[in-house]
Structure formats: structure tokens, C-alpha cells
Image (tube, rainbow, N blue to C red):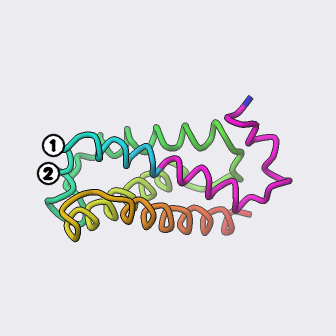
Amino acid sequence: QAEDGIRDLVRSRGLGDVYKRQILRCVEILYDYFHENEASQLIILQNTVTPPVHASVINKLSANIQSFVESNIKLPGMYNKDGIYRVLTQIIISIFSLNVKESNALNETGKIEAHRAGHAYMLNWVNQSS
């Protein structure tokens, strides 16, 4: 059984709502990590808008996000699914980076904007794959 029965409710609630909720949780997972680890904010988020994160770290983060999303909702078949999740992860981290640069700290504004951008990106891919 998926979290809160989401997989069973996909059709009745509308795909956009389900994706939106899952992307928000992905953003929250990354937000909590960076928010609770000040050293990570200083080293990764303040360096550049596109953080100099080693590919293996991005791959691990994106694999975790992909696993979380796919355990809760059934997505249509997508070409290069691993790449889609790597881009989603980069979008979220880049917005967090910009948020830290502008506010000197990771805050709710960064979380909201990362959610908005991540949701738009995933919804675009779902619509292209349908």
C-alpha cells in the first residue's frame, strides 16, 4: 500500500494534485537536509546558483527522490526517467542556492519556489509522455 493510499486515488483526485503533493514532499526532504546542515548550506548552496556537487551525489539524491515518487504514484512511461529525476533534483537545489544567496539563509520562500518549479517540470514531462 502506498503512502496514504495515493496509488489507489490517482485517477479520482487528478494527476496534477497527486504530482503536486509528491513534488512538495521531495522538496521538503531536500529542504530539511540543507536547512538542518548549516555546513552544507555554506559549502554547496552559497558557492553558485548551479552548485558544484559531484555527479555521484546528485545521482544518489535523485535516485532517492525517484524511489519516493514511484513508490507513491504510478507515472506514465518516460524516456530517460533517471535523467528526468536528476534534472528535478538540480532544479530544486539550484533554487535553494539562489534563495540562500538572496536571503543569507534557506527559508520558506525557497521551498515554495522549488516546489513550484519542480511541479511544473514534472507535470510537463507527464503531459509529454501521455
Residue 8: in magenta span: yes
Q: Residue furthest right?
A: 12
Q: Which of 66 and 114 is in front in this view?
A: 114
Vertical comparison of 17 with 69: above or below: below
Locate residue 111 relative to residue 82 in the image: left or right.
left
**Residue drawn where x is 81% and y is 46% of the image:** 9
For the N terminus, give its image quadrant. top right
**Residue drawn where x is 73% and y is 42% of the image:** 6
Q: Principal SS element in the magenta part?
A: helix
Tell me whether circle 1 and circle 2 mark residues in contact (CB < 8 Å).
yes
Magenta part of the protein: which range? 2-26
Q: Nearer the viewer, residue 106 or 3?
A: 106
Residue 39 numbered tag: 1
Question: Picture quarter containing residue 16?
Answer: bottom right
Q: Where is residue 11 in the image (x, y as percent from the top left)?
A: 83, 53
Residue 42 numbered tag: 2
Q: Nearer the viewer, residue 37 or 81?
A: 37
Name the amino acid, label 2.
Leu
Q: Position of residue 98 (x, y in %)?
A: 26, 67
Vertical comparison of 44 with 63: above or below: below
Could you tell me which secondary element the residue under label 1 belongs to? helix
Residue 12: in magenta span: yes
**Residue drawn where x is 41% and y is 53% of the image:** 89
